[in-house]
Amino acid sequence: MKKQWIAEEKLQYERALLSQGVKYIAGVDEVGRGPLAGPVVCAAVIMPLEEENLVIGVDDSKKLSEKKREQLAEEIKQKALCYTIIEIDEKTIDEINILEATRLGMKRAIETLAITPETVLTDGNMTIDIAHKQRSVIHGDALSYSIGAASIIAKVYRDKLMDEFAKEYPHYGFEKNKGYGTAAHIQGIKEHGLCPIHRRTFTKKF
C-alpha cells in the first residue's frame, strides 16, 4: 500500500538503530530560526516504531498544508511515547544568537523527555551539548520519521502562538507571516516601530 510505503521509506535511520538494539530514539527539530519576531520553538519526540502504530503522512512540516499539519500533530501527540516542546524567547535569541538559542532549545527539549532516549536524531548538521548519542541527518525533517514528527508538532505549536501574538500586536500580520520578514510585516515595522516580541538583532536595519 503506497501510504504505508511512504512512512516506511522515512524509517531507514530508525530501523538501522533498532537493528543495533536501540529501543528509544528521539527525533528533535526546531521551527522559527529565520523570523524577525517571536521565539524559536524546539520539539523532541519518541515515537513507537511498530508498524501498527506508525502515523501515516509524517513529512517535513513545510511540505504539508496547515490542515494536514494540525491533523498529524494531534495524532503524533496521541501516539508518542513522550514529547516536549520548548520556546526560547526573542530576548534570549538577542543575548546568545539564534544558533545558540536553537541548541539550547533542543537540549532542553531532549533533557525534559519523560523517557531518556538512547540515541537522538537531529535535523541538519546541528550538534547539541547532551550526554546522549546523537546523529545529525541533513534534510532530516524529510528523511527521518522521528525528526519529521518533531518538526510537525513544533510548527503547529509555533503557528498557533504567532496567531495569538497577532491579536496582541495587530499591526504586523503575524497571523499570516508567523513573524517572517514579509513586505507587509516590514511595512508594519516602518509605520509602527518594533513590538516587544521583535528580535532586536534581526531588525537593526529598521
Image (tube, rainbow, N blue to C red):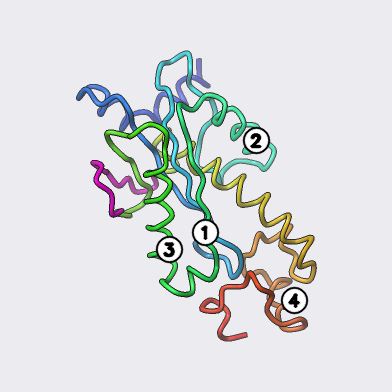
x, y percentage for residue 94? 49, 74
Nearest to viewer (mark 3 / mark 2): 3
x, y percentage for residue 137? 32, 45
Q: Amino acid at mark 3?
A: Ala
Using a 10 Å C-alpha cutoff, classify the residue at mark 2 as few (fewer than 14 neighbours), some (14 to 19) or many (20 or more).
some
Q: Quadrant of the C terminus?
A: bottom right
Q: Earlier in the sequence, mark 1 or mark 2?
A: 1
Instruction: Give the secondary structure at mark 1.
Output: strand
Residue at which label 2 appears? 68
Residue at which label 4 appears? 188
Q: Quote the CA–CA distance across marks 3 and 4.
A: 26 Å
Q: Quote the CA–CA distance across marks 3 and 2.
A: 28 Å
Residue at which label 1 appears? 40
First to last magenta residue range: 128-140
**In this rendering, is residue 4 above or below 42?**
above
Q: Amino acid at mark 4?
A: Gly
Quadrant of the rendered image containing residue 142: top left
Quadrant of the rendered image containing residue 156: top right
Q: Earlier in the sequence, mark 3 or mark 2?
A: 2
Using a 10 Å C-alpha cutoff, classify the residue at mark 4 as few (fewer than 14 neighbours), some (14 to 19) or many (20 or more).
some
